[in-house]
Amino acid sequence: MRFLRGGGIAGFVIRRVLLGLLVMLLVSIIVFVSTQLLGDPARAILGRDATPDRLAALQKQLNLDSSKVGQYFHWLGGLLSGDLGTSLASSQPVTSVLGARIANSAVLVVLAAVISVPISIAIGSYAALRREKVFDTVSSNLMLVLAALPEFVVAVLLVILLSTNVFHLLPAISPVPPGTHAWDYPDELVMPVATLVIAVAPYVSRIMRASMIEVLESDYVEMARLKGLPERTVLIRHALPNAIGPVFQVIAINLAYLAGGVVVIESVFNYPGIGLALVDAVNNHDIPVVQALAMLIAAVYVVLNLLADVATILVTPRLRTRL
Amino acid sequence: MTGSGEKRWHVTERESGLWAPSRRGLVMGAGGVVAAGTLAACGGGSAPAPSGGDTSAAGTPKKGGNFRLGVTGGGSKDMMDGQNIVTKPDQARLVTAFETLLEFDDNYQLQSTGLAESVEADSPTQYTIKLRDGITFQNGKPLTADDVIYSLQRIGTQANGLTGFAATATMDIKNLKKIDAKTVRLPLLSADSTIPQTLASYTFGMVPKGYQAYKGDPSTQIGTGPYKLKSFTPGQQSVHERYDGYWRDSYFDQVTITDFSDSTAQINALKGGNIDAMTDLPANQVNAIKSSGVEALISQTGGWIPICMAIDMAPFDDPKVRQAMRLIIDRQQILDQIGSGYGQIANDLYSPFDAGYNKDLPQREQDIEQAKSLLKSAGKEGLTVDLHTTNGASGMVELASVFASQAKQAGVNITVKNDPNYYGDAYLKLAFSVDFWGTRGYLNQVQQGSLPNSPYNETHWPPKSGEGSNFGDLYKQALAETDDAKRADIQHEMQKAEYDVGGYIIPYFNSLIDAHSSQVQGLKPSKGTLNLAGFGHGFRTIWFA
């Protein structure tokens, strides 16, 4: 297994990318097989109106024939060349059905990440530093409460507070009309992003606090302090890089979860993201759309995990030097 | 064109003593007269037509504004077609641009206020459709006989798979004949007195010759209606712009129909002023929304959620078991629990607004003792049976559960099977199931669900022998009968059989509960099938204060 080692950080990244591609290939087989189990899309689309004549007409329109293996390779080939097929429900190319929704979801996730990660790292670190003082007690308990609240409740509370009952400051929904972009409506993004920040921040700040406390109790931090280094330097130069490793993993998992489409949030704010698109596609047995979204979400998981691993290694000297 | 350039006013004397003037006819002050088998119209193109109900049309209609409607039940399968729907937002979209030859008023009475000036029965097997003058499609072309023929043939072609196909069974679609530019002769394969009702169904929209469903180009969606499609993204939104050449009054500059996945978001959007009206307000919200400048619109419709017993499948092949089930149900409790009291107790019969609805049959009440003894004499004491349902319309799953708990009192064990794929292979093949229906005239409903060749016959009615076995013959007689009173008699006989030995348990007729901002004027309860009083009668009889 010699080829699995060596090459320093570059070798590590290359190995992980190849492994990621293998994972994606396996995922593609699983996704393809499992979506075949969804059943006849024509029936699902028509629902109760599936009279024999309407059913026959639609099945003919949808071209539901040819062998499964042939279909898989045809689909995989399309996937690699960027052709995701045609949505069965809307008869539009999958790329045009999902394009705007993927962009909308990405905006939401990136904004939530950019806001929640620094805030929660700061809160977690400061709480660790002021361990068992007022700030730590208040923030730890608050984070616990927020972590316990379902996103749905947070979203509804925000709506009641900011748009319908108490104040009328922000729009109650964020529909992003077709043909426009989510960032064209900054006021509509406030509440969905705030909900996601509240959903993610507790986990990240709690792991940051725990990790930081462990590091602050370690010998080398004590050594650094005894050397007479300013507390600021001790924290930022010595403690933070070692404490943040586990935090990257938690951030990656949380962001991947958000990227999978936060159905509840999209539902409360009527936000056109990929979560609702996936629910809708499953209901309609719209196989090409389900497949495309499943592959996309799997890819996001693989990429985020890869990034988290690389980041962890880069910031952690003892891992870095082992490569 | 009909030669003379003048607007023609067509009045037919009534022949039947049973005719009662509809309120609309009176409001319009014109002789809208319905005679036996004949519909004749009067009334120009400019009645503001807040029809039906009382005369409390609030204020004078004002022009302008973008009416934003939030609708649940849509998704990426949303479509636009003048004669076809699969989701609720599709219904709203259809009525922005497409109109029917005849129309129902808010009391579910036929009126010739639509595209046809008259639809007359020349004989039981032949109708003549006369188009109104001065109606143009949104591309400026006049509506002609050719368009009507194309429209009806499009629906009547099985391969097109359109909603209305089954209702064209009696029409001799191939032999539709153009008499002149404004007149069409519709021959029938067999007598059918329900043709006018069929032509007033919203899925019988008139489309221009050569019309096709939306496939990405909004300019293909040309109807005679007040709003023209501007943009449409399935699952999200469609925008409809005012058509200035519209033949009646309309008030909004634009109509925007937005899909919602969830009623919570809908209610918040309505309270927050992001939309002006919404469909299907949960009944428990009716009082909660009142303080927020929002009003509920509650329409008693003829819609129903039946429990269906297949009369040829065990254990329901024994009429005593069916009878027992109909005595087990506590209708008032079902109405209170599932409809939150918004509805009207039913009597195992459908189509309550039909002139031939049999009101004389005694109201069936819960009678557990009687049910028990019927089950005993049928040898079915302690019966155990599966009741299949699905989340197809609101209340379907709850109805099954509440009925199951009521049945325990009579020692009947009902297991509720909630199956997401219910409307797949199992539907119509089940002994015991729950379904849903909208408002229809009696004979139209029979054609849809109670004949051997009906597309949705859940109860496998009528029976082959005994009471009700002449149901199909009676149906044909009723279709051929042009005298309203005699037809009502035949319908009464048909309903008596369904009441005695039929397979439906119909607990109540539900209400449609919608909500709108108090800025929206002109909305009044309607007995029709569509939400928000037929979506504000195609968004043309409502306006902003």
Image (cartoon, coloured by chain):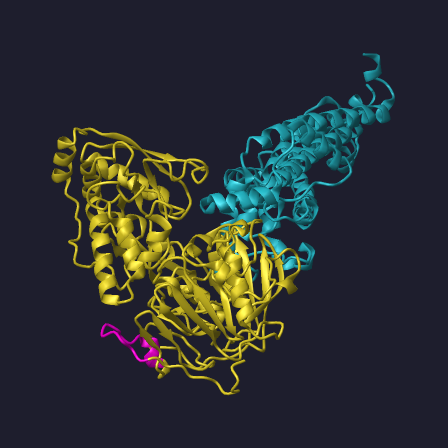
Chain colours: A cyan, B yellow
Specify the quadrant of the image occupied by residue B404. Answer: top left
Residue that lies at the very extreme toward the top in this rendered image: A1
Is B23 colored magenta in this rendering?
A: yes
Front in this rendered view, residue B115 or B107: B115
Specify the quadrant of the image occupied by residue B215. Answer: bottom right
- Which residues are drawn in magenta? B13-27
Front in this rendered view, residue A175 or B17: B17
Q: Is residue B335 above or below residue A24?
A: below
Q: Residue at x 32, y 35 (%)?
A: B431
Left or right, A68 with reference to B320: right
Instruction: Report x, y in % for residue B246.
Output: 55, 76
Is A170 colored magenta in this rendering?
A: no
Instruction: Report x, y in % for residue B241.
Output: 60, 70
Q: Is residue A88 above or below residue B172?
A: above
Q: Is residue B269 above or below residue A72?
A: below
Instruction: Report x, y in % for residue B218.
Output: 64, 62
Asked whether residue B483 appears in the rendered view, the answer is yes
Front in this rendered view, residue A215 or A75: A75
